[in-house]
Image (cartoon, helix red, strand yellow):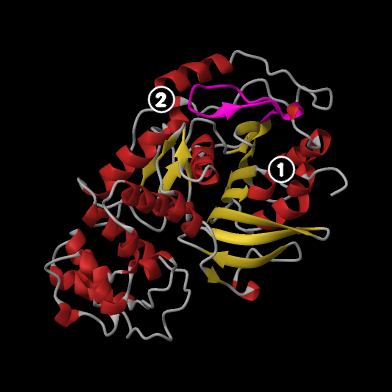
Amino acid sequence: MRVPFNKLAKKKLIILTCVVTLAAATISAKENNSVVLMATATEKALPHSELPSFNVPYISFSPEQLGDGIQVGKFDSFNADKAKLNEFAKKINVQTFGKYDSLLVVKGDSLIFESYYLRGRIDKPHRQASVTKAILSLAIGRAIALGHLNKSDLNKPIVSFFHDLNPAQFSSGVKSITLHQVLTMRSGLRMDGERFAAAIEKLGKKSTHDQLQAILSSSSPITPLSQVFNYQSEDPELAMLVLNAVVPNGAKAFIEKELFHKLGIFNYQWREGSCGLPIGAYGAELTSRDMVKLGLLVKSEGKWQGKQLLPKAYLAKSSNEIVALNESDIFFTGNRVKNPGYGYYWWQADMLIGNKRYLTRSAQGGGGQYIVIIDKLDLMIVTTGHERDEQTMKVIAEELLPLFLPQNS
């Protein structure tokens, strides 16, 4: 799905291309590009993987007000190390940490640092990978806020949300899978790809009903021992099917109208699966600034511009730890990143700086797509990239977070 870019924001962005950004004394003209990186007409039609890379980054310690619903501020107004952040941005530009396309920093409610590199464009939606799952979690919360789901529904079996399924074909144990288990990657499903393909072919259709029937009929037997954390695509696919079943006009229209448009998100894409639904596990594409909006929604306990879009209690549960994980099981832990956990498609971990711990909540997508919230510091960091080494959490803990700590902490 694709909706035209917000006209007011677009108009202001065009003006930006003619404006020279005021730079601090520590920033040279080369380091603080005077023209924000916008996609050309040709680039807008290109997939992200084919975008040409810019050699000179756009770096701003005083982000522009674009009328897009994001409050901006000046970096100098906060007690943070500007010179070291400038050095950090230089390292990103020369790919010291990998191939990153954007880095944005929010302090309080204000965007105070914005930068784009390589394939980053301020107005070009960037692939989100598994951040898509976190968006789906927010959409579930919105459905609860509007009464299409309630708190007790989270513990209901998945099959109770659907009619006209054939239980005789179900794999053993699937009737016990709850929405809560699906949202925490603990459905217990272990799919047989060949069996799933055969089930779809036998059904002869590609509707949401057939997709669900095939999933529930193609798993190995499910037992309490198998219903442990297992990061996979099938669980968010089931969550998307539930959302589609309970909201008016289906999940696609609901996410657009009741989540994205409420946040002023119009310039996006979301890949659809064979049954016509947005893919639950991946496939969304958003601009970096719109990623900021999602983070602000979580950071503000479900409020956006004074309106409660998501239930506070749901966010307190979904974005915080429900499942404790072993550090050895997760790729992003290390000397400075400890105690990983998982909520409803949102991750948690402690970042260790000296003798202090800072709890993080994050949406994470392969390749460098991150929305990281550090509540104790009233801080949020957003990145995009096309990096396969997956070191983002470690880089934030070791290189970036210390720049925002109070002196003598």
What residue sits 24% from the left and 50% below the top? 247
Depth check, front residue: 172 or 125? 172
Q: 156 above or below 282? A: below
Q: Which is the main secondary structure of the residues drawn in magenta?
A: loop
> Which circle marks residue 6 in the picture?
2
Q: Amino acid at mark 2?
A: Asn
Depth check, front residue: 325 or 390? 325
Quarter of the image holding residue 273?
bottom left
Measured Cα–Cα span from mark 2 to mark 1: 29 Å
Going by the image, does 278 lie left or right of 94? Answer: left
Does residue 252 show up? yes
| Local crowd size for mark 1, using a 10 Å CA cut-off: few (<14), some (14–19), many (≥20) | many
Where is mark 1, residue-wise?
A: 92
Looking at this rendering, what residue extends furthest in the right direction? Answer: 408
Quarter of the image holding residue 162?
bottom left
Badge 2 element: loop
Q: Position of residue 290 (x, y in %)?
A: 49, 37
**Which stretch is magenta?**
58-76
Membership of 394 in magenta stretch: no
Badge 1 element: helix
What residue sits 40% from the left and 27% below the top? 5
| Local crowd size for mark 2, using a 10 Å CA cut-off: few (<14), some (14–19), many (≥20) | some
Q: 90 above or below 166? A: above
Q: Position of residue 165 (x, y in %)?
A: 15, 71
Q: Position of residue 295 (x, y in %)?
A: 53, 44
What residue sits 51% from the left and 17% below the top? 12
